Amino acid sequence: MHRKILTMATALLLILTAIFSTSCSAESEYPVTIGNITLKSEPKNIVILNKNLADIISCIGYDVKMVGRSDEVNQKGMGVVPSVGLNANASPASIDELDANVVFADNSLDKSVTDELKKKGITVVILENANTPKQVKNIYKQLGALLGGNITGKAKGKEACEMLFEELKDVKAAVQTMDVVKTVCYLYTENGVLKTFNKGTWGANMLDFTGGINVFENSDTDVVVPENLMLSNPDYIFCADSDVIKYLKSSEKLKKLSALSKNTSIISYDEINMQGDTALDVLEKMLKVMRPEDFS
């Protein structure tokens, strides 16, 4: 009886091993499919039209494949790469001349450009910026897989993202040991409406890494209620541009915010939403405003 059970167990183990081996051998680097895009082989030459995608790809380590960029992709070290024009209206002819086989862009890319690139046999990957930390982690894995394969590239993307988050968290931990916690917020306008980074957004995450308390971190909406802003009266206000500062100063209520006198600074919307290595530079920029004594 015992021998019979042992024989059955051994047979079951062999079957499971065979299934496992088959599933492992079936997994390969390529093809990689993300949404409706399938890459049959690893891209050798890429053009990046979106600044944030370039930032992430660089953080992963695949910027070595970049042979072209848009004018907007102007991070340090990327200016040496040939430009193919503006993000929305890149030149298909210039991209083709660079022998690129994949173009990374966002939805601002003109459809006529996309169609022309496809006619030339160039794959266009459209990816929008991530809005939450969870989406950021996902886009790292997607870009890693597209550029390096389902196994190697995806793992490389995941590791790069984890390292970035760890570095940002380390800065926050160091800051929190220093002194009194400061309150902070970020303001921008959209169609004349004053908005902020509320809970769950990447921007709110960046504010949190400063060690400060985002006065809108628990808000369910990104629309700013003036009375709530006045009540919280943050120690520091970061604005998307000078128009936001003008907006605040022109309001009878908001012009009384104490931070407007000396603790209001401009960090562009694009900057604070960067999700690669530039995020560390932006965090340092914010901390220089909030804690100038630590950088003297």
Image (cartoon, grey):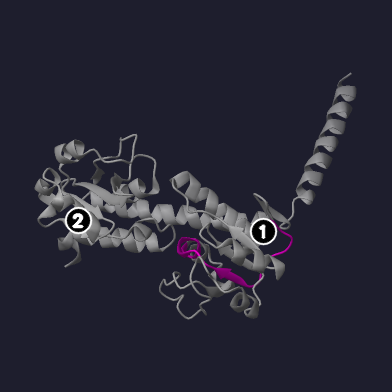
Quadrant of residue 283 in the image?
A: bottom left
Element on which disc 1 rests: helix
Q: Looking at the picture, tell me which residue is in the foreground, 205 or 52.
A: 52
Residue 192's place in the image compared with 66, above or below, is above
Residue 33 covered by magenta stretch: no
Q: Is residue 294 visible?
A: yes
Q: Mark 1 = which residue?
A: 149
Q: In which quarter of the image is the N terminus?
A: top right
Residue 198's place in the image compared with 100, above or below, is above
Q: Residues within 10 Å of mark 2 (few under 14, many from 20)?
A: many
Q: Can residue 155 be seen in this view?
A: no
Q: What stretch is highlighted in magenta?
A: 38-55
Q: How far apart in space, not on screen, are marks 2 and 1 (Cα)?
A: 46 Å
Residue 40 covered by magenta stretch: yes
Where is residue 201 drawn, in percent x and y?
39, 44
Rendered residue at 23%/38% (across/down): 225
- Residue contact at pointers 2 and 1, CB within 8 angstroms: no
Q: Which amino acid does label 1 sit on?
A: Gly
Residue 63 relative to residue 14: left or right: left
Q: Mark 2 = which residue?
A: 245
Residue 58 relative to residue 40: left or right: left
Rendered residue at 55%/75% (across/down): 68
Rendered residue at 49%/67% (across/down): 87
Element on which disc 2 rests: helix
Where is residue 223 drawn, in percent x and y?
30, 40
Of circles 2 and 1, the one toward us is: 2
